[in-house]
Image (cartoon, rainbow, N blue to C red):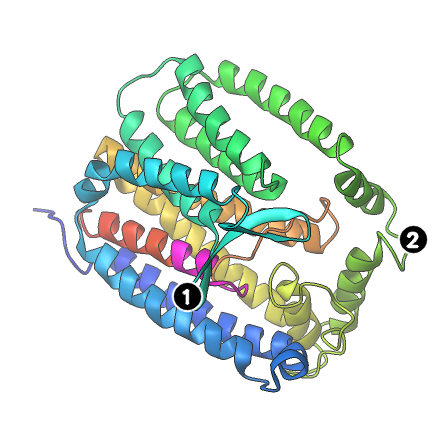
Amino acid sequence: MKRPHPRHPLAVSLFVLTLSLLLLGLLAVYNASVVEAYRDFGNKYHFVFQQLKWTGLGLIIFFVTSLLPPQFYKKIALPFFLLCLLLMIAVLIPGIGNKVQGARRWIALPGFSLQPSELLKLSLIIYLSAWLETPRKLVNFLAVLALVLGLTMLQPDLGTAIVLATTGFLIYYVSGAPIIQLVGLASTGVLGIIFLILSSPYRRARLTTFLDPTQDPLGASYHINQVLIALGSGGLTGVGLGRSRQKYQYLPEATTDSIFAVIAEELGFIGSLILILLLLGLIILAFKIAAQSTNRFNQLLATGIAGWISVQFLLNLSAMVALVPLTGIPLPLISYGGSSLISTLVAVGVLTSIAKTLKT
């Protein structure tokens, strides 16, 4: 007779893939940040030490969340969601939220900058999974999503808003919503994104550079051109580990949004493919856990987490190869940043908790 197992093969595989990605991420952060770290802090290990600290904390929280039963997350769904909404409001208040390059996305804490939108992704998934266990009217679902997206766009952060909206619609669809509703909503969403892009000068500039990367190569198109140079320089096998030229002040956001470009330059197509396959393996495992879950809440929760990681992965890589405009979305488990890394590890811990409930 099949029964739940604390060491389910899917849970073990999930941990192995996650650990592999974390190690690759630490190596990538070090290689991408060494020049900037030495210039700004006189210590070439500064960024990788920070990332290592967050990795250690994230792994501790990962193990804790993996030991808690999935029903625990159902119980805390509403208070956790409300806490994240309060943090999203707090970050907009001058003196609490830090304003960087025109955006308020971080709350300064002792030794750490918290990005509430990263926690919001997980809290929205948990809340919707619990709330949509029973059928809900479309207007109620849209009201919840509109509140979340409104707070996100006040920062402003279009990339995160796209991730939240896509993940929310995926959970709503899996909960039993008619496909015709989602087609109409998707069309409206695309029109809304176009409006937001055209109504903002810096987003219009990103769209223009996406349509024609050769336009203004030293201005608006500079970032995407440097990304494409890095990708092209890598070739099949790369220029060699640690030998990236683009990280020498040429490539913007080399440790965060554009870290894949440094990996592709140093490790080439083969190294990039290995990274992509590891992330795809993680995503496939997440969807397998969702597919094998018989509990409604667990199924929706696993689907939401799988969708969240998938959308971020696709958006980041698509932007790097100029399939979509640059969105400022980090690469899961790879990009530098404590809030994103820890939130993702918590989500993987929740997935592991669900996997342990599956029958072997």
Q: Is residue 337 above or below residue 104?
A: below
Percent position (x, y) of residue 118? 46, 49
Q: Is 287 included in the stretch rendered in magenta?
A: no
| Nearer to me, 115 or 350 | 115
| Nearer to me, 114 or 75 | 114
SS for tag 2? loop
Q: Quadrant of residue 13?
A: bottom left
Percent position (x, y) of residue 223? 78, 58
Q: Is residue 277 above or below residue 192?
A: below
Q: Which mark is residue 110?
A: 1
Q: Residue at x 31, y 25 (%)?
A: 132
Q: Residue at x 67, y 70 (%)?
A: 262
User: Which amino acid, mark 2?
Assistant: Asp
Q: Is residue 234 above or below residue 306?
A: below
Q: Residues within 10 Å of mark 2 (few under 14, many from 20)?
A: few
User: Which amino acid, mark 1?
Assistant: Pro
Which secondary structure is most common in the magenta stretch? helix
Residue 235 in view of the camera: no
Q: Quadrant of residue 307?
A: top left
Give the mark nearer the N terminus: 2 vs 1.
1
Q: Which residues are magenta?
A: 334-344
Q: For mark 2, what is the residue?
A: 216
SS for tag 1? loop
